[in-house]
Amino acid sequence: MTELETRSAMVAVIGAPNAGKSTLVNALVGAKVSIVTQKVQTTRARVRGILADGDAQLVFIDTPGIFAPKRRLDRAMVAAAWDGLDGADQTLLIVDAPSYLAGENERGQAGKSRADTDRIIDGLEKSERKAVLALNKIDDIAIPNLLALAQSLNERGVFTGTFMISAKNGDGLKDIKAFLLEKAPKGPWLYPEDQLSDISDRLMAAEVTREKLFLRLHQELPYDSTVETDDWKETKKGIRIEQTIYVARESQKGIVLGKGGATLKIIGQAAREELTELLGVPAHLFIHVKVREGWANEGARLRNIGLDVVD
């Protein structure tokens, strides 16, 4: 195809923590480009997922959830989310519909989700930026309630289109993909046809291990943990990968290790199996656990996980 025949668009995907942004991007791209767990604020850096369809290419920018930041890590994550809008052709706001509706009568996470979403809409409104609205997790919500929510949010005058979807089950994704493809302007593709993501192999490997860590310990381990890939060597037997899991306290190190190292062994095995599948060669993974109090406020740690440092 010549440049004149092709179309491309950058689509920034934003929303409150745990709204389903990464699940949606993975579903639209048709491959796992972002990790997904039941913990909020799983995505920390911007990840681009790339979809090629006919003459058009969509580059989805999966951003961290936007919330009221406290730590330096939090500020860097929120800044990464808003920065993801720069240069985007379309902005897609994902709303966790059940949590937003529950915010009218409940406290806790649901109320926070509603407040975070309203804060995002305020930001779009102040910056005079238009967006496409996607009400997610609609499976068990009555249609009248969904319609009332869509009407209420559209009264803000920010949205150019509204979709009701289930990113997990695939409902409504065909329509939203067709809408975004149709809006893509003429221009050259931004990535090769067979590329699905812009994340580096080292960061991808760290993200896979972090996902397994969260999935295994989501009840016991708070957000005071991160994973870095320290070394990456191609050998005749595959790829040797050395990583470090950083935690904030000595007690958390014991949680990650487990009795006799059993928990870390399970996490490492799960990560090793997925990395072998993703890389197409045997992954020989070696994981260390270190205590580093205050790592979430260290510029070096934040840069290593793909974030720009925000003071």
Image (cartoon, rainbow, N blue to C red):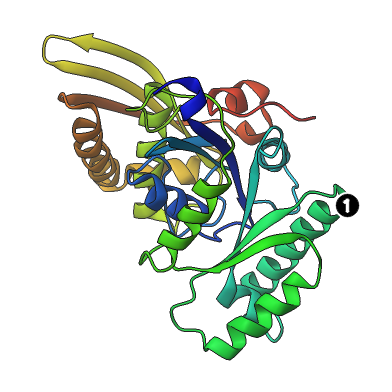
Q: Position of residue 280 (x, y in %)?
A: 17, 27
The amino acid on which the numbered mark 1 sits, given as a three-letter code, is Lys
Which residue is more in the foreground, 252 or 15?
15
Query: Percent position (x, y) of residue 272?
Result: 22, 34
Q: Quadrant of residue 235?
A: top left
- Tell me if residue 214 can be seen: no
**Which of the 4 image quadrants contains residue 276?**
top left
Assign a secondary structure to mark 1.
helix
Asked whether, in this view, residue 195 is left or right of residue 199, the answer is left
Looking at the picture, tell me which residue is in the foreground, 206 or 262. Answer: 206
Q: Is residue 73 left or right of residue 283?
A: right
Is residue 121 shown to the viewer in this render?
yes
Q: Nearer the viewer, residue 283 or 114?
A: 114
Q: Residue beneath label 1, please?
A: 126
- The picture quadrant where one finds residue 239 is top left
Nearer to me, 257 or 62: 62
Residue 19 at x, y percent in the picture: 56, 61
